[in-house]
Image: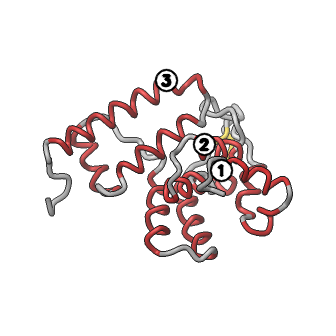
Amino acid sequence: LLESDHPDYLRAAWETGITAVVLPEFDACMDCEQNHPYHIYDVGEHTLQSLLCVENDKILRLAMLFHDFGKPLTHSRNEEGVSRFYGHAAVSAEMAHDIMRRLKFDNDTTDKVKKLVAEHDRFIKNEPNRVRRALSKITKELFPYFLKVRRADILAQNPAIQEERLAELAELTKLYEEILEKEQAVSIKD
């Protein structure tokens, strides 16, 4: 289903009670509101929308499925009633790891998805040194996936903030491509 042209049909699995048996963590997302200027959907609907915004690739689709699974567990509100999800990326990554183990995914796929979920919300200042540092941490292999995950996450958010955030992502992508083009070192080993 996730690798189909309609990964959002996961909604039908939720409506019919299938996810309650196979993926109950998704059901918690469908019941978790996001009262925040960046979001117009609840966590579950945001997840479904983000699946539509990323290409049909097993690792990318799994990363988008799991990227906010920790939000129901980390949800709080500030004095103004705005939703906060402190530490949700780390919690989501651990949940992704546990769920993928339960569903018998291979180690390589599990490790890559866990890393992408853990880093999906990482803010990277658009400065060459910061980008090289992030590239080293996320790894050269996964950084292109990271950029696609960030883009899908942004496209599934409030349209009012998308233009600015997509422009920042475009600048980050440009810096990343320059680093690769110039074959700059991104780690001590390099």
Local secondary structure at mark 1: helix
N-terminal-most mark, 1 or 2:
1
Q: Amino acid at mark 3?
A: Glu
Q: Do callouts 1 and 2 mark residues in contact (Cβ within 8 Å)?
A: yes
Q: Nearer the viewer, residue 45 or 13?
A: 13
**Residue 104 figure quarter:** bottom right
Report how far apart the C-alphas of labels 3 and 2 lie in the structure. Answer: 18 Å
Which residue is depicted at the point 33% across and 31% down? 171
N-terminal-most mark, 3 or 2:
2
**Residue 115 figure quarter:** bottom left
Question: Mark on residue 163?
Answer: 3
Local secondary structure at mark 3: helix
Which residue is depicted at the point 72% across and 65% down? 23
Report how far apart the C-alphas of labels 1 and 2 lie in the structure. Answer: 7 Å
Residue 50: x and y in percent read 59, 43
**Residue 127 figure quarter:** top left
Q: Nearer the viewer, residue 25 or 110?
A: 110
Q: Residues within 10 Å of mark 1 (few under 14, many from 20)?
A: some
What residue is pinned by disc 2? 52
